[in-house]
Amino acid sequence: MANNTTLCTSIMSCVVSMIVAQALMLQIAEFIVLVTSIAYHGFDRTQNSLIHKIDILAVVTNIFLHLYFSPDSFFVTLLAWYGTAIFLFRLSHFYKGKYWYLTSLGHAAGAYAHVGLASAMVAVASAT
């Protein structure tokens, strides 16, 4: 149940993020996270395995890309949402998956941050 739920929320987070991505680089980054997330949550499910480390690296790279493309006015807000998502992931890992729903909430926070980023990018583009 737990792994299936975290897999579904991860997939939905990535799909939402790919749909709202305003730049090709962000869409590619989201697709890579989608693939590594499916590999980890769907098949491997072993913490600290190679695919888990690749998934974390893909997510971190994705976060840096999103922060790079973020308009200045939205940077702190985006950073706060990513901080929340990372905190939830770390808390879930700290308790060895006992509170697995924290991972799902982290995925949701990441997707919400991406929707907010898309809105901010559109607002900046339409203002110029």
Image (tube, rainbow, N blue to C red):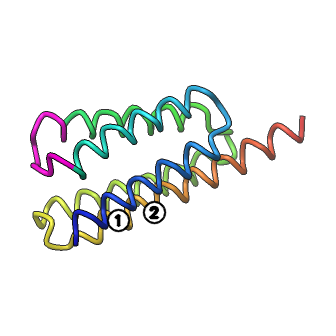
Residue 104, disc:
1
In this orientation, which residue lies closer to the viewer: 110 or 124? 110
Q: Is residue 57 above or below residue 89?
A: above
- Residue under circle 2? 108
Q: Is residue 117 magenta?
A: no
In this orientation, which residue lies closer to the viewer: 117 or 104? 104
Disc 2 secondary structure class = helix
Tell me the crowding category of disc 2: few under 14, some 14 to 19, or many 20 or more residues within 10 angstroms, Cα based: some
Residue 1, disc:
none
Q: Which residues are magenta?
A: 43-52
How far is disc 1 from disc 2 in space, using C-alphas? 6 Å
User: Callout 1, which amino acid?
Assistant: Ser
Q: Estimate the x, y position of residue 31 in percent, counting from the top left.
A: 46, 35
Direction from residue 8 to residue 18 in the image, left or right: right
In this orientation, which residue lies closer to the viewer: 76 or 15? 15
Q: Estimate the x, y position of residue 1 in percent, counting from the top left.
A: 22, 72
- In which quadrant of the rendered view does residue 85 lie? bottom left
Residue at 18% in and 48% down = 43
Direction from residue 29 to residue 26 in the image, left or right: right
In this orientation, which residue lies closer to the viewer: 16 or 99? 16
Q: Please report contact status of discs 1 and 2: CB closer than 8 Å, yes or no.
A: yes
Numbered disc total: 2
- In which quadrant of the rendered view does residue 22 lie? top right
Q: Is residue 44 magenta?
A: yes
Disc 1 secondary structure class = helix
Residue at 39% in and 31% down = 61
Residue at 47% in and 57% down = 12
